[in-house]
Image (cartoon, rainbow, N blue to C red):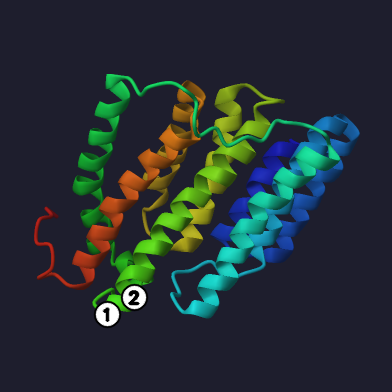
Amino acid sequence: MPAALVSASGVLLFGFENDPLGYGALALGLATAAFIDRELMRHLALVAAGMVIISLVPLNADLSLQHMALMGGALALAVLVPWLVSRFVYRERIIRFPVNTGRKWPLPAKLYLIGVVFLGYLVLPAYLIRTGVYQNWPDASDPTIFWRLFLGVNTVGIWDELFFICTMFTLLRRHFPDWLANLLQAVVFSSFLWEIGYQAWGPLLTFPFALLQGYTFKLTKSFSYVVTVHLTFDFALFLALVHAHNRDWLPIFLY
Protein backbone atom coordinates (compact mmCIF):
# COMPACT_ATOMS: atom_id res chain seq x y z
CA MET A 1 0.00 0.00 0.00
CA PRO A 2 2.73 2.59 0.77
CA ALA A 3 4.36 2.10 -2.64
CA ALA A 4 0.96 2.17 -4.36
CA LEU A 5 0.17 5.48 -2.66
CA VAL A 6 3.49 6.96 -3.78
CA SER A 7 2.88 5.73 -7.32
CA ALA A 8 -0.71 7.05 -7.29
CA SER A 9 0.56 10.43 -6.12
CA GLY A 10 2.35 10.69 -9.47
CA VAL A 11 -1.00 10.44 -11.25
CA LEU A 12 -2.39 13.19 -9.03
CA LEU A 13 0.67 15.44 -9.29
CA PHE A 14 1.40 15.06 -13.00
CA GLY A 15 -1.73 13.60 -14.56
CA PHE A 16 -4.35 15.73 -12.78
CA GLU A 17 -1.98 18.46 -11.57
CA ASN A 18 -3.67 18.36 -8.18
CA ASP A 19 -0.81 19.19 -5.83
CA PRO A 20 -2.74 19.06 -2.51
CA LEU A 21 -4.07 15.55 -3.17
CA GLY A 22 -0.77 14.45 -4.69
CA TYR A 23 1.30 15.62 -1.74
CA GLY A 24 -1.27 14.12 0.61
CA ALA A 25 -1.03 10.70 -1.04
CA LEU A 26 2.77 10.98 -1.00
CA ALA A 27 2.84 11.82 2.72
CA LEU A 28 0.37 9.06 3.55
CA GLY A 29 2.46 6.55 1.64
CA LEU A 30 5.61 7.50 3.54
CA ALA A 31 3.80 7.53 6.89
CA THR A 32 2.32 4.10 6.23
CA ALA A 33 5.71 2.74 5.20
CA ALA A 34 7.22 3.99 8.47
CA PHE A 35 4.94 1.60 10.37
CA ILE A 36 5.50 -1.34 8.03
CA ASP A 37 9.12 -1.30 6.90
CA ARG A 38 11.64 1.42 7.75
CA GLU A 39 13.94 0.52 4.86
CA LEU A 40 11.02 0.74 2.44
CA MET A 41 10.16 4.13 3.92
CA ARG A 42 13.72 5.39 3.39
CA HIS A 43 13.72 4.27 -0.24
CA LEU A 44 10.25 5.64 -0.95
CA ALA A 45 11.42 8.93 0.55
CA LEU A 46 14.13 9.10 -2.11
CA VAL A 47 11.55 8.59 -4.85
CA ALA A 48 9.24 11.11 -3.20
CA ALA A 49 12.02 13.70 -3.03
CA GLY A 50 12.56 13.48 -6.77
CA MET A 51 8.83 13.67 -7.48
CA VAL A 52 8.34 16.70 -5.25
CA ILE A 53 11.26 18.53 -6.86
CA ILE A 54 9.92 18.10 -10.39
CA SER A 55 6.39 18.96 -9.28
CA LEU A 56 7.59 22.43 -8.28
CA VAL A 57 8.17 23.57 -11.86
CA PRO A 58 5.82 23.68 -14.86
CA LEU A 59 6.33 20.57 -16.97
CA ASN A 60 5.69 21.62 -20.55
CA ALA A 61 7.47 22.23 -23.81
CA ASP A 62 8.08 25.93 -23.25
CA LEU A 63 11.43 26.44 -25.00
CA SER A 64 12.29 29.83 -23.59
CA LEU A 65 15.78 29.88 -22.10
CA GLN A 66 14.38 30.76 -18.68
CA HIS A 67 12.02 27.80 -18.60
CA MET A 68 14.58 25.40 -20.03
CA ALA A 69 17.05 26.43 -17.32
CA LEU A 70 14.40 26.14 -14.58
CA MET A 71 13.11 22.79 -15.72
CA GLY A 72 16.60 21.47 -16.45
CA GLY A 73 17.75 22.42 -12.96
CA ALA A 74 14.75 20.70 -11.37
CA LEU A 75 15.26 17.53 -13.39
CA ALA A 76 18.94 17.46 -12.45
CA LEU A 77 18.17 17.89 -8.75
CA ALA A 78 15.46 15.21 -8.90
CA VAL A 79 18.16 12.69 -9.86
CA LEU A 80 21.05 14.09 -7.84
CA VAL A 81 19.25 14.42 -4.50
CA PRO A 82 18.15 10.75 -4.25
CA TRP A 83 21.57 9.56 -5.45
CA LEU A 84 23.50 11.77 -3.03
CA VAL A 85 21.33 10.83 -0.06
CA SER A 86 21.48 7.14 -0.92
CA ARG A 87 25.23 7.21 -1.45
CA PHE A 88 26.44 9.51 1.33
CA VAL A 89 23.66 9.46 3.95
CA TYR A 90 22.31 5.91 3.68
CA ARG A 91 25.77 4.60 2.69
CA GLU A 92 24.23 2.43 -0.04
CA ARG A 93 25.25 1.73 -3.60
CA ILE A 94 21.82 0.79 -4.92
CA ILE A 95 21.27 3.65 -7.37
CA ARG A 96 23.68 3.20 -10.24
CA PHE A 97 23.87 4.31 -13.85
CA PRO A 98 25.75 1.47 -15.60
CA VAL A 99 27.18 2.77 -18.85
CA ASN A 100 30.28 0.73 -19.59
CA THR A 101 29.08 -2.78 -18.71
CA GLY A 102 31.77 -4.51 -20.75
CA ARG A 103 29.14 -6.47 -22.65
CA LYS A 104 28.55 -6.23 -26.37
CA TRP A 105 25.00 -5.80 -27.50
CA PRO A 106 23.79 -9.10 -28.97
CA LEU A 107 22.04 -9.29 -32.33
CA PRO A 108 18.52 -9.31 -30.80
CA ALA A 109 19.33 -6.06 -28.99
CA LYS A 110 20.44 -4.43 -32.24
CA LEU A 111 17.37 -5.70 -34.08
CA TYR A 112 15.20 -4.34 -31.28
CA LEU A 113 16.59 -0.85 -31.96
CA ILE A 114 15.56 -1.17 -35.61
CA GLY A 115 12.11 -2.27 -34.45
CA VAL A 116 11.86 0.78 -32.20
CA VAL A 117 12.59 3.09 -35.14
CA PHE A 118 10.00 1.33 -37.29
CA LEU A 119 7.38 1.43 -34.52
CA GLY A 120 8.00 5.12 -33.92
CA TYR A 121 7.70 5.80 -37.65
CA LEU A 122 4.34 4.04 -37.82
CA VAL A 123 2.74 5.16 -34.57
CA LEU A 124 4.00 8.62 -33.65
CA PRO A 125 2.82 10.68 -36.66
CA ALA A 126 -0.65 9.13 -36.48
CA TYR A 127 -0.85 9.77 -32.75
CA LEU A 128 0.49 13.33 -32.85
CA ILE A 129 -1.44 14.55 -35.89
CA ARG A 130 -4.79 12.78 -35.55
CA THR A 131 -5.16 13.83 -31.90
CA GLY A 132 -3.68 17.30 -32.39
CA VAL A 133 -1.37 16.84 -29.40
CA TYR A 134 1.60 17.91 -31.54
CA GLN A 135 0.45 21.44 -30.67
CA ASN A 136 1.68 20.80 -27.11
CA TRP A 137 5.16 21.28 -28.59
CA PRO A 138 6.19 24.50 -30.37
CA ASP A 139 6.64 24.92 -34.09
CA ALA A 140 10.28 24.23 -34.91
CA SER A 141 10.38 26.15 -38.19
CA ASP A 142 12.62 28.74 -36.54
CA PRO A 143 16.22 27.41 -36.46
CA THR A 144 16.68 28.39 -32.81
CA ILE A 145 13.50 26.60 -31.73
CA PHE A 146 14.43 23.66 -33.95
CA TRP A 147 17.64 22.99 -32.03
CA ARG A 148 16.10 23.78 -28.65
CA LEU A 149 13.35 21.26 -29.37
CA PHE A 150 15.93 18.67 -30.38
CA LEU A 151 17.89 19.32 -27.18
CA GLY A 152 14.78 19.30 -25.00
CA VAL A 153 13.36 16.07 -26.39
CA ASN A 154 16.64 14.25 -25.93
CA THR A 155 17.40 15.70 -22.50
CA VAL A 156 14.02 14.66 -21.12
CA GLY A 157 14.46 11.22 -22.68
CA ILE A 158 17.76 10.71 -20.88
CA TRP A 159 16.31 12.00 -17.61
CA ASP A 160 13.38 9.57 -17.83
CA GLU A 161 15.81 6.67 -17.71
CA LEU A 162 17.93 8.23 -14.97
CA PHE A 163 14.98 8.75 -12.64
CA PHE A 164 12.23 6.27 -13.46
CA ILE A 165 14.42 3.30 -14.36
CA CYS A 166 17.80 3.70 -12.64
CA THR A 167 16.38 5.33 -9.51
CA MET A 168 12.71 4.49 -8.92
CA PHE A 169 12.59 1.03 -10.52
CA THR A 170 15.92 0.06 -8.97
CA LEU A 171 14.84 1.10 -5.46
CA LEU A 172 11.46 -0.62 -5.71
CA ARG A 173 13.09 -3.86 -6.84
CA ARG A 174 14.69 -4.08 -3.41
CA HIS A 175 11.26 -4.62 -1.89
CA PHE A 176 8.95 -6.05 -4.56
CA PRO A 177 8.97 -8.55 -7.41
CA ASP A 178 10.30 -7.08 -10.64
CA TRP A 179 6.89 -7.10 -12.31
CA LEU A 180 5.31 -5.08 -9.49
CA ALA A 181 8.21 -2.64 -9.24
CA ASN A 182 7.94 -2.14 -12.99
CA LEU A 183 4.19 -1.45 -12.85
CA LEU A 184 4.66 1.07 -10.05
CA GLN A 185 7.35 3.03 -11.90
CA ALA A 186 5.43 2.89 -15.19
CA VAL A 187 2.43 4.60 -13.58
CA VAL A 188 4.54 7.59 -12.56
CA PHE A 189 6.58 7.49 -15.79
CA SER A 190 3.48 7.73 -18.00
CA SER A 191 1.88 10.34 -15.71
CA PHE A 192 4.97 12.53 -16.06
CA LEU A 193 4.88 12.16 -19.83
CA TRP A 194 1.19 13.12 -19.81
CA GLU A 195 2.03 16.49 -18.27
CA ILE A 196 4.94 16.92 -20.69
CA GLY A 197 2.46 16.68 -23.57
CA TYR A 198 1.63 13.04 -24.35
CA GLN A 199 -2.10 13.49 -23.84
CA ALA A 200 -5.29 12.19 -25.52
CA TRP A 201 -4.65 8.44 -25.86
CA GLY A 202 -0.95 8.96 -25.14
CA PRO A 203 -0.91 6.70 -22.02
CA LEU A 204 -1.80 3.75 -24.28
CA LEU A 205 1.58 4.42 -25.88
CA THR A 206 3.67 5.66 -22.96
CA PHE A 207 2.62 3.11 -20.33
CA PRO A 208 3.69 0.05 -22.38
CA PHE A 209 6.85 1.91 -23.36
CA ALA A 210 7.68 2.52 -19.69
CA LEU A 211 7.10 -1.17 -18.91
CA LEU A 212 9.32 -2.22 -21.79
CA GLN A 213 12.08 0.11 -20.63
CA GLY A 214 11.99 -1.35 -17.14
CA TYR A 215 12.01 -4.89 -18.48
CA THR A 216 14.84 -4.05 -20.90
CA PHE A 217 16.91 -2.63 -18.05
CA LYS A 218 16.28 -5.76 -16.03
CA LEU A 219 17.56 -7.90 -18.90
CA THR A 220 20.51 -5.80 -20.01
CA LYS A 221 21.48 -4.06 -16.73
CA SER A 222 22.69 -1.30 -19.03
CA PHE A 223 21.75 2.36 -18.69
CA SER A 224 23.45 3.11 -22.00
CA TYR A 225 21.25 0.60 -23.83
CA VAL A 226 17.90 1.78 -22.43
CA VAL A 227 18.93 5.37 -23.17
CA THR A 228 19.80 4.38 -26.73
CA VAL A 229 16.38 2.78 -27.11
CA HIS A 230 14.70 5.88 -25.72
CA LEU A 231 16.66 8.34 -27.84
CA THR A 232 16.07 6.24 -30.93
CA PHE A 233 12.34 6.46 -30.31
CA ASP A 234 12.63 10.17 -29.47
CA PHE A 235 14.44 10.82 -32.74
CA ALA A 236 11.37 9.52 -34.55
CA LEU A 237 9.28 11.74 -32.25
CA PHE A 238 11.35 14.80 -33.10
CA LEU A 239 11.05 14.23 -36.84
CA ALA A 240 7.31 13.60 -36.51
CA LEU A 241 6.86 16.84 -34.55
CA VAL A 242 8.74 18.83 -37.16
CA HIS A 243 6.57 17.31 -39.88
CA ALA A 244 3.33 17.81 -37.92
CA HIS A 245 3.93 21.56 -37.69
CA ASN A 246 5.22 21.86 -41.26
CA ARG A 247 3.56 19.24 -43.46
CA ASP A 248 5.76 20.00 -46.46
CA TRP A 249 8.84 19.10 -44.38
CA LEU A 250 9.85 15.47 -44.19
CA PRO A 251 6.84 14.12 -46.12
CA ILE A 252 7.89 10.56 -45.36
CA PHE A 253 5.28 9.56 -42.81
CA LEU A 254 2.12 7.53 -43.17
CA TYR A 255 -0.94 8.57 -41.18
- Compared with 252, 93 (above or below) is above
Query: Which residue sits at x=59%, y=53%?
Result: 11
Q: Is residue 98 left or right of residue 144?
A: right
- Disc 1: which residue: 142
**Percent x, y of residue 137:** 36, 70
What residue type is disc 1 on? Asp
Please tell me in which quadrant of the rendered image residue 225 appears: top left
Please tell me in which quadrant of the rendered image residue 15 appears: bottom right
At numbered mark 1, what does the secondary structure look like: helix, strand or loop?
loop
Q: Quadrant of the N terminus?
A: top right
Numbered marks: total: 2
Query: Which residue sits at x=23%, y=59%?
Result: 240
Q: Is residue 85 left or right of residue 76?
A: right
Query: Which residue sits at x=75%, y=51%?
Result: 26
Classed neighbour count for the residue bearing mark 2: other residues with Cα under 10 Å, few (<14), some (14–19), many (≥20): some
Query: Which residue sits at x=56%, y=64%?
Result: 72
Work out how far the residue at label 2 is from the one at label 1, CA to CA, in angstroms.
5 Å
Near-viewer residue (112 or 254): 112
Q: Quadrant of the C terminus?
A: bottom left
Q: Is residue 202 left or right of residue 124?
A: right
Q: Residue 231, can we see it?
A: yes
At numbered mark 2, what does the secondary structure look like: helix, strand or loop?
helix
**Percent x, y of residue 85:** 79, 45
Please tell me in which quadrant of the rendered image residue 37 appears: top right
- Disc 2: which residue: 145
**Percent x, y of residue 20:** 73, 64
Classed neighbour count for the residue bearing mark 1: other residues with Cα under 10 Å, few (<14), some (14–19), many (≥20): few
